[in-house]
Image: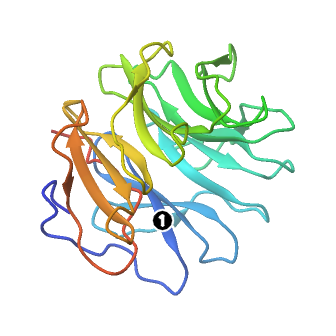
Amino acid sequence: MDDDGGNQIQLTDNESGDWGPAWSPDGDRIAFDSNCDGDLEIFVMDSDGRNQTRLTDNESADWDPAWSPDGGCIAFDSNRDGDEEIFVMDADGRNQTQLTDNESGDWDPAWSPDGSRIAFHSFRDGDDEIFIMDADGGNQIQLTDNTSGDCWPTWSPDGGRIAFVSDRDGDDEIFVMDADGRNQTQLTDNVNIDWWPTWSPDGSRIAFGSVRDGDYEIFVMNSDGSNQTQLTFNSSYDDHPAWYPVE
């Protein structure tokens, strides 16, 4: 859809679920999750929905694709080793490589704009926290530390900040922090769920999903949390926005 909610166009149409869209950096392709083959796999298609191609193929679940800034790699989640870990592969599905390895879950990879680091959330300290690591899986550093859950990190286009979701006030809200974990600031505040933040290419706005009107809808706000505006209006399920990467 347009960034004001207009011109909503359907791209996929099958009897199974398709979700978790992620634009390639050049805006020509979209990676996404689908269970059309009976389990979750990662697919890619042209930006008009054509040429849908499966990239992963195993009996476990693969989901949450995230493109590297140069478009050459896709990071993703998989439980192929028995628990949720972060993997990376070439954009054509080759060279699938495991980056994290622990007994707790690691999810939601998000590349830094320069491609050198990946943010993610992990349950390794007993609750969900935000971590970053080098793009090869090394130097894993914890950024958040509280007794509530912090998840779904996403980098600002300038690499200086990370938006994320936390339930530290009793329900899921969107927060932002510096890329080193400092200056954690709450952006949304209501009794319903706000999640799936995604930055506009110029860093001025954040789109997100919310159930504040009784069902899942897409909203947008300024990057300081002001001017929260609803973009979708229907009784079905609209979620997981992904901003077109080219201004």
Circle 1 Cα neighbour tier, 10 Å, few/some/many (<14 / 14–19 / ≥20): some
Q: Please indicate, yes or no, whether residue 92 appears anywhere in the rendered image.
A: no
> Does dot 1 land on a helix, a strand or a loop?
strand
Residue drawn at x 41%, y 33% as measured from the top left: 175
Q: Position of residue 238 (x, y in %)?
A: 36, 68
Residue drawn at x 41%, y 40% as measured from the top left: 174
Location of the C terminus (image quadrant): top left
Q: Position of residue 160 (x, y in %)?
A: 36, 16
Front residue of this view, candidates 181 and 9: 181
From what the image shows, is residue 235 above or below residue 214?
A: below
Location of the N terminus (image quadrant): bottom left
Farthest residue in the bottom direction?
Answer: 15
From what the image shows, is residue 208 above or below residue 58?
A: above
Front residue of this view, candidates 37 and 125: 125
Front residue of this view, candidates 88 and 20: 20
Q: Position of residue 68 (x, y in %)?
A: 46, 33
Front residue of this view, candidates 42 and 110: 110
Q: Please indicate, yes or no, whether residue 87 appears anywhere in the rendered image.
A: yes
Q: Position of residue 141 (x, y in %)?
A: 65, 16
Residue drawn at x 40%, y 68% as measured from the top left: 51
Residue 246 in which image quadrant: top left
From what the image shows, is residue 201 above or below residue 212?
A: above
Does residue 22 appear left or right of residue 143 in this picture? left
Q: Say which amino acid is labelled 1.
A: Trp
Number of marks in the image?
A: 1
Residue with the mark numbered 1: 19
Residue 38 in which image quadrant: bottom right
Residue 158 in which image quadrant: top left
Residue drawn at x 65%, y 66% as measured from the top left: 40
Does residue 239 appear left or right of residue 84 in this picture? left
